[in-house]
Amino acid sequence: MGSEFTKLFELIISASLINNFVFTRFLGLCIFFGVSKKMETAVGMSITFTAVMMISAAISWVVFNGIMIPLDITFLKIIVFIGVVAGFVQAADTIMRKVSPGLYYKLGIYLALISTNCIILAVPLINAGEKYSFIQSLAFAFGSGLGFALALVIMASIREKLELADVPIPFRGLPIAFIVAGLVALAFTGFSGLITL
Amino acid sequence: MFNDSKIKKITIIAFSFYCSIVLLLFCSTSVFAGVGGGVEAKEKIDIIPLIKWTLVFLAGVGAFFGVVLALAAKRFAVRTDPKVEQVRDVLAGANCGACGFAGCEQYAEAVVKEPDVASNLCIPGGAKSAEAVARITGKTASALEPNFARIMCQGGWSKSVKKFRYEGVQDCRAAILAGGGDKSCRYGCLGYGTCSRVCPFGAITMSEDHLPVVDIVKCTGCRKCEKACPVKVIEVLPASKQVLVTCHSKDKGGDTRKNCQVGCIACGICVKVCPFDAPSVENNLSRIDINKCKVCGLCVPKCPTKAITDFIPHRSKAFVLDKCIGCQICAKVCPVNAPLGELKKKHSIDKDKCIGCGICTARCPVQAIDGTFNASEVFAASAEKKKKKAEAA
C-alpha cells in the first residue's frame, strides 16, 4: 500500500515538475502564451484546465480499457480520444451554463479553447501507452494540470511585471515572452533527475 | 422556438463528426491492416471482424455523443432574452466595470432581468446609452449626474520639494516602490503620468509641471485612473461639486508648508468663512463635505495657500430681473453686500462687489436674480415645484 502511494506521489511530481508539459515537453504553447497576460485569467484557465484534464482522463481510461482493449482496436485511440474530449467539453459547457451560471461566466470562456488542446489529448494517450491503472491515470492528469497551472502562474506574474519594464522596442510583446519562457524552461531542466521512476 | 435550431445544429455537428470518422477509418483500417502496423505483434489479422468492430464501436461512440449532446441541449437549454443582446450593443462596450457589474454582458443581463437595476448605470455610455437601454427595457431613464476625476494635488514639480532624485522607470507605480516616491510630501501626485496612460478615453494629459490635467469633455468618470494611482490622489466626484480642497496632505501645517507651496496647512479659515459649514479640519487637512457645499466659492480666495480650487472656470455676476418684489432678502444673505435698493422697490446688484457665489439666486423667493452659475438649476427646480403644486390642486 505504501509503495502504491509513493508511486502516485512520484507520478504527480514527475508530471508537474520534471516532465512539465509546457517547459519540458513543449506542448500546449498556444494557450500558454495566449492566456498568460493577466494573473486573473491565468488562474481561471488553470482551474478549468486541471478539472477538464482529470475528467477526460477518467472517461478516456474507461473507454480505452473497457471497450477498446477487449475489442482489440487500440490503434483508434487518437481519433477516439479527440472525439471523447470534444464531446465531453461540449456537454460540460451546455450543462454548466444551466446548472451553475456563475461558474460558467468565470470559467466557461476557457472551455472552448481547451477542447482542442494538445495537453488534454496527450494525457489520455500517455496513460494508454504507459498502461497506467485508473488511479494512476487520475494522478498523472492531476500532476499535469498542476504543472500547467504552475507554468501559467509563473508566466503571468512575470509578464505582469514586464508591462512596467523598459523592454527594447523590437522585443516588446511576444518576443520577450518567448525569451522568458525559454529561460524558465532552462530553469526547469534543473528538476531532471529529482526522482527516478 | 429557440431550442430547435440549436439542437438541430448540434445534432448535425455530431452526425457529421461521426460520419467523417467512419470514412477516415475505412481508409486507415485498410492501410493499417494491410501493413500490419497498428496492431502489433500479430502475425495474422482477421480483417473482417476488425472492420466490423471498428465500425460498430465508432458508430456507438458517435451515436452516444450525438444523443447525449442533443438531450443536454434540450434538458439544459438556457433561454436567452434577445433584449440582452440589444442592450449590450448600445452600451459603451469598454468592460470598465464602472456600473458595478463584472462587465457589459453582466450588466446587460441584470438590467433586462431585474426591475431594480437602473438603466443609467453605464457611465462611459452616458445619457445616450441610458436612453437606449431605457427604451429597450421599458424603464424610465433619468440621466445620471456625470462624475469627473479630480486631481487632489496642485503641487507640480516647480511648487513642491523632492527628497531625492529618482532615475528609474518613468511610472508612478514604479516610483512609489523607491522609498514611497521622490516627493517630500508623501500624499502628493508623483507626476510620472500613470493615470494619463491608463485612461481609456485619452482624457488625462500631463502638464509641463508634471501634473495631470483632466479634460472634462472626454472624462467619463470610469474610475480607472483612481484605481491605478498609487498615492490615491485622484478622486472621482459628481460634476456639480466644483469647489474642492485639492490637497491630501495629512502632515502638520509647518511640514506641509516646507514641502509644498500649495498644500493645505489646516489653518481653519475656510471653516470660518463658509456659510454652510461644509469644510471641516481633521488630521491636519481640511475637507469639504460635498453634500453640504453649495459651490459658492467664498472659501477659494480666502485660503492663504490657494489649496482650494474652484473648478468653475469663470463665475458670471448676478443681475436682478423685473419680477423683483423688493424684499431685501438678497441683501441679508449676500456675503459681500453687493445688492442695493430700498424695501418694496426693484433692487440692483453692484457688479464690482459681486463674486458670483449664487447664494442670493438660491434664496430669492420669486427667482428674480439671474446670471449666476446656478440660476438655470434653481429656476428649473422652482418650476418643477410649481408644477407639482398645480397638479395637486
Image (cartoon, coloured by chain):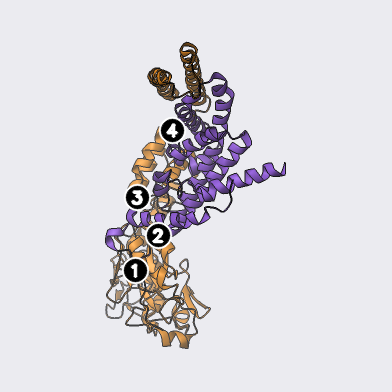
Residue B302, picture quadrant = bottom left
Residue tagged 3: B125
Q: Position of residue B94 (x, y in %)?
A: 36, 50
Colour displayed for chain A in the image of the structure: purple
Q: Secondary structure at mark 2?
A: helix
Residue tagged 1: B193
Confirm or deny contact between disc 1 and disc 3 (CB under 8 A).
no
Mark 4 or 3, nearer chain start = 4
Q: Circle 1 marks a residue in which chain?
A: B
Which mark lies nearer to you, 1 or 3? 1
Amino acid of disc 2: Lys
- Both marks 2 and 3 on one chain: yes
Residue B12 at least partly seen: no
Residue B121's place in the image compared with B234, above or below, is above
Question: Label 2: how many residues lie within 10 Å, few (<14), some (14-19) or many (20+)?
Answer: some
In the picture, the disc for residue B242 is none
Which mark lies nearer to you, 1 or 2? 1
Q: Position of residue B33 (x, y in %)?
A: 43, 18
Mark 1 or 4, nearer chain start = 4
What separation in Å lies between label 4 and label 2 (alpha carbons)? 31 Å
